[in-house]
Amino acid sequence: EALAGVEPRSSRVPFYSTVVGGVWDTAGLDADYWVRNLRETVRFGPVVEGLLGEGFGAFVEVSAHPVLTVGVEESGAGLVVGSLRRGEGGAARYLASLAEGYAGGLPVDWSVLFPAGVGVVDLPAYAFQRRRYWLVSQRDGAVGAGGVVDEVEARFWAAVENEDPGALADTLQIDDERLREVLPALSTWRRRHREQSHADSY
């Protein structure tokens, strides 16, 4: 009774059916079709392969949670994104998914998100000439704002690397005995730091 007045109609966008394994007129999405959908073999793989063969390389899974993206990715699709996720059904998640698609090359009309009359500014087209605009750890040879290496921090890391409690205490300007109370923890941290650095090198 609730669906009595609902009738399927032909769509402007081609509908690829996993029931028939190809394009299907959506005017035929009646009760019989959905019974077949439940009872017959799902031809998901062949349909995706057919779309790839026709030149489609980007897929968007419009659903409450992306469960088919892995299967599509395994078929060799170039870009596969979802729309919403379980527990993330709001506009922020949807916009993040749009951004994923946009970064992958899909056309997205961002103008609809802004008030009328607001212009869009393109990013500069020139190269950034490999200049860095963020701070780098002093341990990696970074320099301070004045262009001089922070000597105190350099001495600190040298003392840590050399496991020199006396030099470390002098650098931190604390009592040597108080420092020795935390040395076991420092030693554990240093070992983990070395292991992580070794792992990062691969």
Image (cartoon, rainbow, N blue to C red):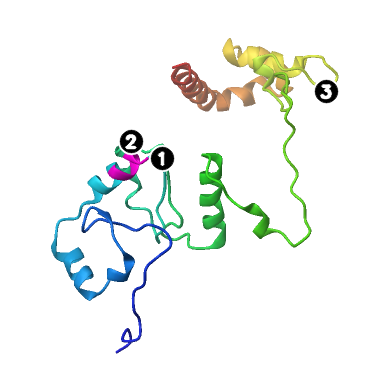
User: Which residue position holds label 2?
Assistant: 76
Disc sitting over residue 142 in the figure: none
Disc 3 versus disc 1: distance between alpha carbons?
47 Å
- Residue under the image location 35 percent in, 41 percent down: 54
Dominant secondary-structure state across the stretch colored magenta = helix
Q: Single out the mark in the foreground, 2 or 3.
A: 2
Residue 21 shown in magenta: no
Instruction: Give how far across and how far down residue 5 sits, in percent.
Output: 35, 86
Disc sitting over residue 145 in the figure: 3
Q: Single out the mark in the foreground, 1 or 2.
A: 1
Residue type indicated by callout 1: Gly
Residue 80 as seen in the image, left or right of residue 75: right
Disc sitting over residue 57 in the figure: 1
Q: Looking at the image, which is closer to me, 4 or 184?
A: 4
Label 2 crowd bin: few (<14), some (14–19), many (20+), radius 10 Å: few
Instruction: Give how far across and how far down residue 170 sits, in percent.
Output: 72, 16
**SS at badge 3:** loop
**SS at badge 1:** loop
Residue type indicated by callout 2: Gly
Instruction: Give how far across and how far down residue 166 sits, in percent.
Output: 65, 13
Q: Single out the mark in the foreground, 3 or 1.
A: 1
- Stretch of the chain drawn in magenta: 50-54
Label 1 crowd bin: few (<14), some (14–19), many (20+), radius 10 Å: some
Disc 2 versus disc 3: distance between alpha carbons?
48 Å
Residue 197 as seen in the image, left or right of residue 125: left
Q: Quadrant of the C terminus?
A: top left
Labels 2 and 3: the sequence-earlier one? 2
Residue 150 as seen in the image, left or right of residue 79: right
- Residue under the image location 76 percent in, 17 percent down: 143
